Amino acid sequence: MRKGVITVYLAITFSILLSMMLGAIQAAKYSAYRVVCECALQSALLSAFGEYNKELLEQYDLLYIDLSYMTNQVSYKALTDRMESYMNENLKEPEGRLLFANDFFGTGNAHVSMTRCEKASDLFGSNLKKQAVEYTKDFIGADFITDFLSIIRVKKEYALDEESFKKKKEELDKEASEALENEKSEKGITEGTKNENTQNENTKNDGSETITGKETEDAKTINSMLSIDYLDMTYIRPLTAFLLKENVSGVSGKHFQILDAPSFRLKSNLESSEGAFSETETDPLADVYFTEYIVRKTGNYVRPKENSYLRYEAEYIYGGRNNDSENLGLVVESIFFIRTAANFISLEQDEEKKEIVDQIAEGISALTDIPAPVVSALIMCIWAAGEASYDVEDLYNGERVALIKNADDFNLSLKGGMKNLLPDHTYKTSGKNEPAPVGGTDIGNYASEKKDLELSINLSYEDYLRILIYLTPSSLKSLRMMDIIELDVHITPGNENFRIDWCLNGAEFDVTVKSEFGADYELKRKYSYSF
């Protein structure tokens, strides 16, 4: 009787222990299989995101998945199908099993869906800008940033731009016009009186002609340039042809269809992903880094990029026109006015030149009754513009030009120099400066030396491009950079259907795995490229 009790007790105990052991094994199996699923998902992510577009990496050091996969069809499903394929490959039973034994886990079947993603075109290219900024941070030092921001500060403080200079010019024109009107209304000089005064003026001082006499060649030139119709700077011909006339036949005429560009597609029909992972770029130096990225990765007039759709890509970032010649013209014009304003300031700071200008202005003022300070300022405007023409040509020939010139840096002198400003004048490179190395810059070499940046630094054509591109609105820079990237990748073999707005930087996935033994697993994972 007692033996039977022990047998029942042992049977109950054994069954309990067996159920506990089997339960532990099953729990371990479930837990282990979750680890297998997570490993399979991680492997699938690495495999899928390892299929980045090679041209983007080689040309622009950007990591993006092209959802077209070099086909003419684009969809998110192409990525999720690849994810499923890679996961199922890792979840299937291994081949070559021992006899008829089943694998411990059996076969699993994964279903992958994308919940949100991050594309290059999100928020008008902010994601592309983020990658470019992270890449460029490895190449830009603190000295470069200090010098570059100092140059921007100088440009803003001295108002070295077209708008400020034109405004100043309009004020001077207005003052000159008012003075002429007042002269006519107050004095009411008759034609005969004018002739008599002119004759007296030309024969005074023992019959010798004065420096401001209308009979002299220089005086005629000055007076013609001081006429109201002439003071709007229209004597500068279309700037691309005029300043680059020796090379104008070689100016690129390449263009593209703007309606096919990402900037047009995104502005007319914003096609963004469901959301971005990271917050909007808040780095105050982001525009400095992005500007340098653009200058380094794009071609320009003095350093055209090989195998590119447009020859002057950096000029397009600034100008935004769909052809090279217009963009080059806009950059020429902007640099011309920067140099004109800078030269005007240089003249104002040069006491010797200012004294000569004032003497001439007093003579002209006596003839025209236009206030001498107004005439002086107008003469300096014309002088500064003529000097700027030399500066621009020097820049386009690969030379450097001082940001703020000293007396020895000027190419034009006032004596006989006014005639050289006529439209038919043939400009020649001054040849004062050594040609700047292609892609080189002095920015970053001055902060440590503690020099006066305004007086010491010489800027190349690319440096002026840096300034112009930096001051371009950030969203425009990103959109136009996407245009350039798409155009360049388009012309590479197999990428005829490439679209930058279908390039994926990261995504978040929901994954469901059904195991052969009946367990269901739900996983969530996000992945994105990072530098």
Image (tube, rainbow, N blue to C red):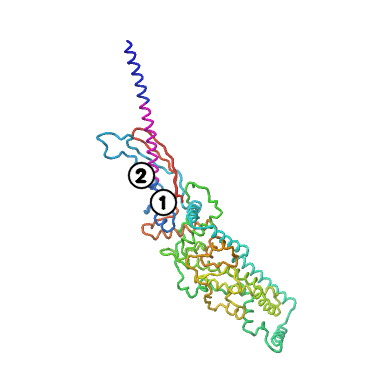
Where does residue 267 sit, x and y in percent of width and height? 50, 55
Within 10 Å of disc 2 (Cα), the crowding (few <14, some 14-19, many 20+) is many
Report whether residue 37 is seen. yes
Mark 2 and mark 1: span between their CA atoms?
16 Å
Q: Amino acid at mark 2?
A: Tyr
Which residue is denoted by mark 1 in the rendering?
65
Specify the principal SS of the magenta part: helix
Q: Quadrant of residue 345?
A: bottom right
Relative to 189, is 49 above or below?
Answer: above
Apparent side of residue 81 relative to residue 363 in the rendered image (left or right) = left
Residue 93 disc label? none
Total numbered labels placed on residues in the image: 2
Where does residue 101 sit, x and y in percent of width and height? 27, 33
Q: Earlier in the sequence, mark 2 or mark 1?
A: 1
Return the residue found at the far front: 449
The residue stretch that appears in magenta: 21-45
Relative to 227, is 472 above or below?
Answer: above
Where does residue 90 sit, x and y in percent of width and height? 34, 41
Report whether residue 472 is seen. no
Q: Quadrant of residue 3?
A: top left
| Residue 40 falls within the magenta-colored stretch | yes
Q: Please tell me which residue lies in front, 148 or 509.
A: 148
Which residue is denoted by mark 2 in the rendering?
86
